[in-house]
Amino acid sequence: MKVKMNATHGLFSLILEPDELDILKPNEKVSLGSKMVEINLPWQLDPDTIHPDHLALCIMMITHPFVGKVLTFPKPVSQRFYDFHHSKSTRYTIGPVDETLEPWSPSENSRPGLAFSGGVDSTAALALMPPTTAAIFMDRPIRKKSLYDKDAAHHSCLEVERLGYDMHVILCDLEYVRSPVGFPVDVANSVPAVLMAEYLNLDCIGFGTIMESTYGTGHRRYRDYPNGNHYTLWGGLFKAAGLPFILPVAGISEVGTSMIVNKAPLGTLSQSCMRGTWKKPCLNCWKCFRKQLLDNAILGNQPDSNYLDDIFNNKEASLFLSRIPIKHENILTWSTHRLESEHELYKLLKERVRGAEDALDWLGKWYSPSIELMPEKYRSGVKEKILKYLSIMDLEDENKLMSWDMKDLIESDTVAQQSESLTNQMSAALKPR
Ligand SMILES: [Zn+2]
């Protein structure tokens, strides 16, 4: 694939030109959609000042699933960037290379950037990062009728700005490169931040990636994230471009990030629901279902029956709850362990996710070995802030995390029966909203 660039002050565009060796349909569900990307960078930013390695990194985040053998950039990359990619022997080669090009390094007084989404996890990340952090929100233009509502996210961004942060909202349509619409790779929400790294003098790029996604606690089993494929490839490419990852919440679960936003001054501005409007989550999606139980458990609010009737009247949640394991099942276990009710559906849920048996206290604590997922310069500052909100896991907690494995649960007949009766009764009770 060849990628061309067309850039003036204010509008930056990329044109993708696939060849016959490219992979236009990487799997059953995903194919190459739009071949044109438009990004509204600030007009003060001269596109010629974007370092070629940053440009290349962004192109890789946009095209990665679709490239077959060769990816050709509009400008040659540095030897360092090329060598790192080459050492990872992905299925394609990149080029051209300019041996005389200095790899990028930040200038004095550089600071972190954060790919900010407005949700709980990235708000918690921002609360733990230095106050000089530049928060960059990638704003997807809405083209067709969509459930996605930008109202809440836009309000969050305005609040971040009001609290004194350097906040940037960048209109960028890269999600249309993938069909169905979405990020081609999970770190692609940082494309505007990477393109602005020179302009904003950034020295690392932050993400609100939580323990469920890094160490696998929201999934079947523990994984050694720092030595896994994702971190060595993408974390390595970012580092080779002079912009290492900073993952302040990588060792914190969704329980912990919710505890942080419940206490931090920044916390009032986060909202994870992308369908409701500002301060009015839709209460009809999977995220809302999980978050309602979690927040009540954190605050120690015991739910009454009417409230639970309302929460369980959620069709999307009934689909998610029918899976084994349930996505982020650990969060439901933690929450139901702390909430008591004789509500019929609630009792079935608590039984299904083993809420009575397992307290999972360690989910509310910080896994400190994750500090290695931050540049040294920022470690002590972030650690100090984390410890204001959370306690630290001891060795026993760490062992519980590292031995996380849902295999027995997945294979259990009892769990299968419990899942069936929960989903059947929940669907039977659904009423029009
Ligand atoms: Zn919702």
Image: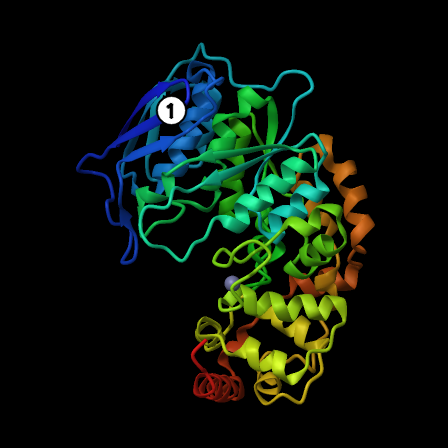
Residue closest to the eye, 75 or 146: 146
* Residue 47, horizontal then vertical, whole percent: 42, 18
Residue 127 versus residue 1 in the image, above or below? below
| Residue at horizontal 58 percent and vertical 52 percent from the top | 214
* Residue 366, horizontal then vertical, whole percent: 74, 54
Residue 237 appears in the figure: no
Q: Amino acid at mark 1?
A: Leu
Quadrant location of the N terminus in the rendered image = top left
| Residue at horizontal 41 percent and vertical 42 percent from the top | 140
Q: Secondary structure at mark 1?
A: strand
| Residue at horizontal 38 percent and vertical 45 percent from the top | 184
Is 93 situated left or right of 87 in this image?
left
Q: Which quadrant of the view contains residue 126?
A: top right
What residue occupies the far left of the structure in this picture?
20
- Colour mode of the rendering: rainbow
Q: Which quadrant of the view contains residue 378?
A: top right
Residue closest to the eye, 403 or 352: 352
| Residue at horizontal 29 percent and vertical 57 percent from the top | 29
In the rendered picture of this protein, how many numbered marks are placed on residues?
1
Is 364 situated left or right of 87 in this image?
right
Residue 143 appears in the figure: yes
* Residue 75, horizontal then vertical, whole percent: 36, 18
* Residue 252, horizontal then vertical, whole percent: 68, 54
What residue occupies the far top of the structure in this picture?
100
Label 1 beta carbon within 8 A of ligand 1: no
Q: Which residue is mark 1?
A: 11
Residue 56 versus residue 226 in the image, above or below? above
Residue 316 versus residue 390 in the image, above or below? below
Which class describes the residues within 10 Å of circle 1: few (<14), some (14-19), or many (20+)?
A: some
Q: Which quadrant of the view contains residue 211?
A: bottom right
